Image (cartoon, helix red, strand yellow):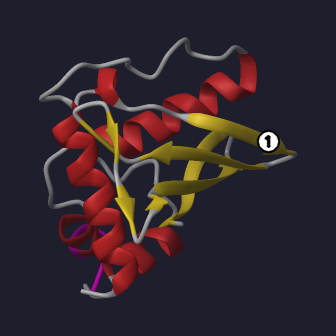
Amino acid sequence: MKAGQAALALVGAATVLAGCGGSNGSGSRPAGEAGAVHDAVVKFETSPDCDGITDAALTKLAEIGENRQQRCQIARNHNYPDASVVKVRAIKITGTAATAQVPAEAGGVKVTSGGKELVETVSLVKQGGRWMISDAHTD
């Protein structure tokens, strides 16, 4: 497993752990396009469904697999938190591209590595009228 995959797995595990403690949830859902981006990010963070992930992003997340179905099973094979514990922040939309940040938290406590807060940056692209995950990495 590469460092990027390990970091994403850590963010996912930390978000799952957040369900064991207090939960502030994702806050209010923004209106308009920001709300659609929010929904796509929450679905990505809380569901093994690959329907909202571009082929290129899925290939990057899985790194192996002969077809989309295999890559989906490999990349999305982990525990998922309840949507109420996923915090989507800093949604930025520029035309048909968007980014959002999801901080890693465990039981309401920010997860850090080397003294730096772990935050997953999720990139999206609008295709066919809907927002699709095009990349996800931990900074």
Q: Quadrant of residue 84?
A: top left
Residue 66 placement, left or right of 77:
right
Residue 67 visible, this orientation: yes
Look at 46% across and 45% down and name the residue there: 103
Callout count: 1
Q: Is residue 49 above or below residue 85?
A: below
Look at 13% across and 49% down and name the residue there: 79
Quarter that holds the C terminus: bottom right
Residue 94 placement, left or right of 20:
right
The amino acid type of the residue labelled 1 equals Ile
In this view, the residue in front, 50 or 114, is 114
The dominant secondary structure in magenta is helix
Q: Is residue 96 magenta?
A: no
In this view, the residue in front, 107 or 83, is 107
Residue 39 placement, left or right of 89:
left
Q: Is residue 67 magenta?
A: yes
Q: Which residues are magenta?
A: 66-70
Q: Position of residue 20 (x, y in %)?
A: 12, 29
- Residue matched to label 1: 93
Q: Is residue 61 above or below residue 40?
A: below
In this view, the residue in front, 62 or 84, is 84
Q: Is residue 46 above or below residue 51?
A: above
Look at 39% across and 37% down and name the residue there: 43
Q: Check disc 1: other Cα within 10 Å, few if <14, some if 14-19, many if 20+.
A: some
**Element on which disc 1 rests:** strand
Residue 84 placement, left or right of 41:
left
